[in-house]
Image (tube, rainbow, N blue to C red):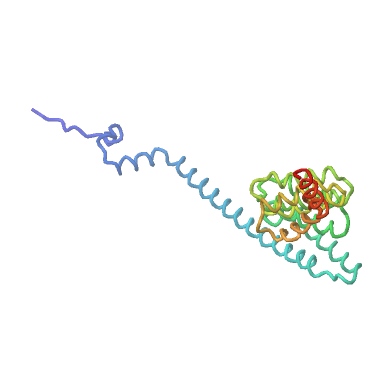
Amino acid sequence: MTYKIRHISKQVGAENPQLLSRRERVWLFAERHRRALITGIIVAVLVMMLLGILVWLEHQHEQEALVLEHQAAQAYLDRSLDDGDAAKEKLQEAVTLYRRIIEEFPHTASAQSAWYFIGNALAEQNDHAGAIDAYQHFIDQAGNPPALLGLVYQRLGSSYLANGEREKGIDAYRQVLQMPRTLNKDQVLFEFAKLEEYEQRNDEALARYKQLLNEHPNSPYTSEATLRVKILEPPADEPEAPQEGTEQEEMQEQKEIVE
């Protein structure tokens, strides 16, 4: 009897993956999906390269913006207080540099604070309308720190008052007093009280000074606030001292009645 040798198919392992080890199954999967895996690896490498380029560009933009910010701050701080024309040129130079930061590097940290410094420079030039617009741009941005935001509202209020817009100025001051994490509430209360006193609203001014003393006892404005309270607060009514002659007359009358 003749025997026929049966050839084991090479596809048995592929058709029965449960018979393979884990490593063999991985290689089998890779073999079957070779094109998709290669494409995925290429895409992942390209994405990583793109992210690296974006991070590098962001870093470069931050550095270039910092250079412009340093130049602007130097122009703002180094202006001569004795030469008005030269000081005005320096302030305008600072404003131009800050605007360059906003236009060329809008997503940098320097651009986020640039509107605040533009407002300060314009306020120094008595361009109160321009300062109001700059401060409002800063407030409209997202992600502003509360401490700096409170300071901007204070500057905004002062600019409104200087521009003759009293109610808007007071509203800006009230915004500072209502914000939970601002650090300049004592200064705003003091400025608020001075405004009320200037307008001869002494009762309101007195209330603001007392609020400052009660809520911020360690403020550098407490000494002057205490002085203003003493000046504005009406004197307490003192009982009248009895007159000596009147007492003697009453005693004499009582003596006569007894006799």
- Residue 4, compared with residue 254, is above or below; it is above
- Quadrant for the N terminus, please: top left
Horizontal relation, residue 80 to residue 182: left or right: right
Viewer-nearest residue: 107 or 20? 107
Q: Nearer the viewer, residue 83 or 2?
A: 83
Q: Position of residue 170 (x, y in %)?
A: 80, 45
User: Residue pushed farthest left?
Assistant: 1
Quarter of the figure with residue 95:
bottom right
Q: Residue at x 71, y 49 (%)?
A: 211
Vertical placement of residue 55 versus 136, above or below: below
Q: In the rendered view of the protein, which quadrant contains the C terminus?
A: top right
Residue 245 shows in the view? yes
Is 56 left, or right, of 249 in this rendering? left
Q: Position of residue 114 (x, y in %)?
A: 74, 56
Residue lying at the far front of the rendered structure: 259
Q: How many marks?
A: 0
The residue positioned 45% from the left and 42% from the top of the image is 37
Residue at the extreme top of the image, as rendered: 1
Q: Position of residue 174 (x, y in %)?
A: 75, 44
The single residue placed furthest to the right in the displayed view is 85
Q: Quadrant of residue 52?
A: bottom right
Residue 245: name its quadrant.
bottom right
227 vs 86, nearest the viewer: 227
Q: Is residue 236 visible?
A: no
Q: Taking 197 as reference, is 46 left or right? A: left
Q: Nearer the viewer, residue 252 or 82?
A: 252
Q: Residue 141's x, y, as percent?
A: 71, 46
